[in-house]
């Protein structure tokens, strides 16, 4: 009878708490969104499953080593986040997948990518006003960049206890780009502005594409060394893609390596969303502030687009400013969709990719600024 009681007491049923059951329900809901609604499934599915695994009562997956006993599987995999390994490797894959041609062809779209980062710094100030520390405020503000790996990297460096809430907020808003952005874009522009057909982009030479990642890393590396882990891997991946002599490395960065890191990153990020860290007032504040950051980033990009529309005599469609947040390529596709509503013959996708990839660079630079000043 004692043995039977010990077995019963060691089950999850006997040790379940309301908070763990709530977190498991949240994990199942996020899993539903990833599978049924296809909201960023490549990351939301492993994140939500990691969240589910770690919130089982008595789950050993995140146990740290104790008295000679080994730690849990996800505890060791999480070292890749804690040591700042996974996000830069994700950036390596992003660089190998990204064509910087639209940005090189139309370099003034860098301004749109820069403008869209305004939401990061305004939300940083808002988080300070809510009582968060400067390090926590920086981690919350970076959600406005709509760049999951950057948000994870910065949070793991400055406020690891917020990693679960920040990562879930960042990827949720990335997945909800088609829902959040269009109302803001329509509210800030007229139908005439949305219908603008832009001039054809010039063709970019192979030499320009090879030189671009080298020049960017030379400039940003000298001005902001703290951004080198992210930007360095981004530009290395792009150099693999464009130089023409490293096809195998480019394909590995885009596929095998990227897929493996996505699995490890998603599982371990989800594993940090345990009930004790996630079910707090802070989490609600982070989710609200993250939405504010993303909305302000979208609005500031569109407003910069309107300014460029005025200065160029109506040659720039202000909608492409919304792509300045770095949700690649979802934000660019949203620009295309909203633009075609106003003008069915309009094709904004390639023009929006310029500010979109500029936003990737901009969010990494913003993270580097926070690391240099606050960490």
Image (cartoon, rainbow, N blue to C red):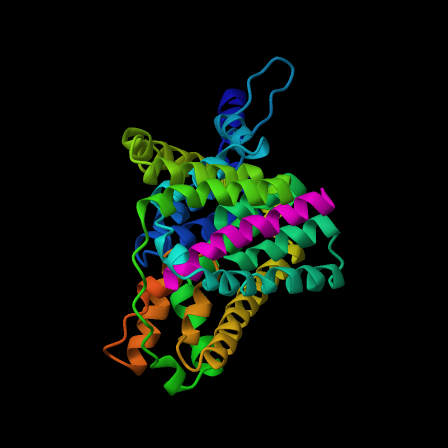
Q: Position of residue 236 (x, y in %)?
A: 43, 36
In-image side of 42 versus 289 (left or right): left
Residue nearest the observer in this picture, 183 or 332:
332
Q: Residue at x 42, y 64 (%)?
A: 177
Q: Which span of residues is magenta-colored?
A: 352-375
Relative vertical location of residue 137 with respect to residue 239 in this rendering, above or below: below
Q: Is residue 307 above or below residue 109?
A: below
User: Can the viewer see residue 107?
Assistant: yes
Quadrant in the rendering for residue 322: bottom left
Instruction: Name the one closer to the observer, 117 or 350.
Output: 350
User: Is 60 in the magenta?
Assistant: no
Considering every residue shown, the one lying at the far left of the view is: 345
Quarter of the view holding residue 207: top left
Q: Residue at 65%, 60% (x, y): give it.
A: 121
- Residue found 54% across the figure and 35% down from its top: 81
Residue 357: x and y in percent read: 43, 54
Q: Is residue 18 visible?
A: no
Q: Main secondary structure of the magenta part?
A: helix
Count of numbered tags: 0
Compared with 282, 66 (above or below) is above
Residue 292 appears left or right of 109: right
In the rendering, at what x and y percent does residue 150 appear? 53, 47
Q: Is residue 365 magenta?
A: yes
Residue 283 image offset from top left, x and y in percent = 61, 55
Question: Which quadrant, please, contains the C terminus?
Answer: top right
């Amino acid at each position: 009878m004692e043995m039977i009681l010990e077995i019963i007491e060691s089950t999850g049923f006997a040790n379940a708490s309301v908070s763990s059951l709530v977190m498991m329900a949240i994990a199942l809901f996020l899993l539903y969104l990833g599978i049924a609604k296809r909201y960023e499934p490549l990351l939301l599915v492993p994140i939500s499953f990691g969240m589910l695994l770690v919130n089982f009562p008595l789950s050993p997956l995140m146990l740290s080593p104790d008295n000679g006993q080994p730690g849990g599987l996800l505890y060791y995999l999480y070292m890749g986040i804690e040591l700042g390994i996974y996000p830069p490797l994700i950036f390596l894959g992003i660089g190998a997948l990204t064509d910087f041609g639209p940005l090189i062809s139309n370099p003034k779209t860098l301004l749109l990518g820069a403008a869209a980062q305004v939401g990061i710094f305004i939300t940083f100030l808002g988080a300070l006003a809510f009582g968060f520390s400067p390090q926590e405020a920086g981690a919350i503000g970076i959600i406005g960049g709509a760049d999951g790996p950057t948000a994870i990297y910065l949070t793991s460096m400055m406020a690891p206890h917020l990693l679960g809430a920040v990562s879930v907020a960042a990827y949720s808003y990335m997945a909800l780009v088609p829902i959040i952005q269009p109302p803001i874009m329509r509210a800030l522009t007229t139908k005439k502005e949305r219908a603008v057909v832009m001039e054809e982009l010039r063709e970019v030479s192979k030499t320009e594409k090879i030189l671009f990642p080298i020049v960017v890393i030379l400039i940003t590396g000298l001005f902001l060394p703290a951004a080198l882990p992210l930007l360095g891997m981004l530009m290395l991946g792009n150099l693999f893609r464009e130089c023409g002599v490293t096809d195998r490395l480019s394909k590995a960065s885009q596929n095998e390596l990227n897929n493996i890191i996505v699995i490890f990153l998603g599982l371990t990020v989800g594993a940090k969303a345990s009930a004790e860290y996630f079910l707090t007032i802070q989490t609600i504040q982070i989710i609200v502030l993250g939405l504010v950051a993303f909305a302000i980033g979208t609005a500031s990009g569109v407003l910069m687009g309107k300014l460029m529309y005025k200065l160029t005599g109506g040659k720039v469609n202000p909608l492409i400013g919304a792509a300045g947040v770095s949700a690649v390529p979802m934000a660019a596709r949203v620009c295309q969709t909203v633009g075609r509503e106003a003008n069915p013959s309009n094709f904004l996708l390639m023009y929006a990719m310029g500010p979109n990839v500029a936003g990737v660079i901009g969010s990494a630079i913003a993270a580097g600024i926070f690391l240099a000043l606050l960490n």
